[in-house]
Image (spheres, helix red, strand yellow):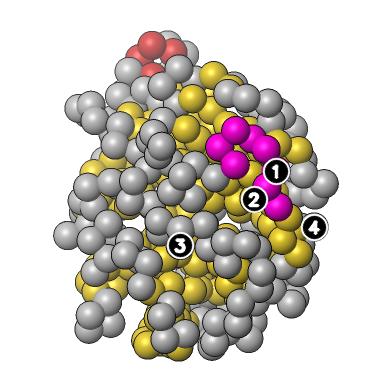
Amino acid sequence: HPNQKTIAVGADDGRVTLYDATKGRELRGAIQRTAAVSTVAFAHDGSLAVGGADGLVAIVDKRGKLVREIAAGEGIRAVAFAPKTKEVCVGGEGGVHLTYFGEDGKRRLPFPGRSLWVWSLCFSPDGCYLAVGGDDDSSIAIISTKANEVTKEIRREGPDDIINARSNGPFAKERDFRIDCHPAVRCLAYAPDGFSLAAGGLDCRVVVYYLPSATVRTTIKRQGAVWAVAYSTDGNCLAIGGADQRIGFYDVGTGAPQRVVPALDEVRCLAFSPTYLASGDASGMLVLHPVDTEYTGPKDDAQLSKWEAAAASDDDEETASGASDDDGVALPPISSPKLKTGLAIIADKW
């Protein structure tokens, strides 16, 4: 371990299931929690952290045995293991804005700088920094894990227009409002080299920041609120998913689109391995998209829209499906009526 082949999926019914991505089958028995699962994360040794609406973070070892439960506070939205350790950071609503727990599960001093909900957090590859995003002043805090202080505060400027970010997902009541220059952060991802950070949110944009100077490297516009971003393991590709029910693949250096793939519903979570991108959406579908094969399908939203229009008017299924070569593999639904709200994949640098 890590084996880069195992996927963990959390659902709104409190169930967490592990899949073998190479064979598309469920591994050991599912982990059942008492409330909706909003986030899951793997440690370097294959241990799994599961957080959700019950305010508890369950630490499960690689054999599926519950090691401990951490009472973190209500409304957990994000968990992340520090690299090469089993120290875990937890963010969310209420009394769990941002708290750090040691390997023994004991609470350490809370990290500074956050007063409102934390929706996303991620450690730098070397574990020296923690990026935190949420509703707090529409900014991203870069926190030094050694000094326990904010070293950078990156403020996201709002869009020039008013964007409707209505959502029908598991947190619909919190997302059903109009956005007027309020670029709240919902997802973050460090590049494998640790120098860049991608941030997506309610303003329908993903901004890639160059961290040494805290400047904007690339801005990618989407057609709806962005719920998930993920870097490929080589750091050259950025995957984006959200309310527009599409998964876009982009060149990190230029921001140019490489491919776009339709989803059945709003895309909630993304995770890369060297050979697949795993995506989970609000319909309860988990799909593995191959990334190591040649792709000749739609490369941007305009091409995909034309393909969808042609497919809708063509009764020949072979003609319609032949326009896309994504060939994603759909794994068996864990619980068909329930929503996938957390996903993680074991990989060396994540």
- Give the CA separation, mark 3 to mark 1: 19 Å
Q: Earlier in the sequence, mark 3 or mark 4?
A: 4
Does the residue at mark 1 contact the one at mark 2 (Cβ under 8 Å)?
yes
- For this rendering, which residue is in front, 82 or 10? 82
Q: Earlier in the sequence, mark 1 or mark 2?
A: 2
Q: Residues within 10 Å of mark 1 (few under 14, many from 20)?
A: some
Q: Secondary structure at mark 4?
A: loop
What range is drawn magenta here?
61-68
Q: Residues within 10 Å of mark 2 (few under 14, many from 20)?
A: many
Q: Is residue 176 magenta?
A: no
Can you give x and y, in whole percent of width and height, for residue 151 in the image?
37, 88
**Residue beneath disc 4:** 54
- Give the CA separation, mark 1 to mark 2: 6 Å
Q: Secondary structure at mark 2?
A: strand
Q: Earlier in the sequence, mark 2 or mark 3?
A: 2
Q: Is residue 229 visible?
A: yes
**Residue beneath disc 2:** 59
Q: Residues within 10 Å of mark 3 (few under 14, many from 20)?
A: many
Can you give x and y, in whole percent of width and height, for residue 7 in the image?
50, 35
**Residue beneath disc 3:** 82
In the image, residue 275 above or below residue 249: above
**Residue beneath disc 1:** 66
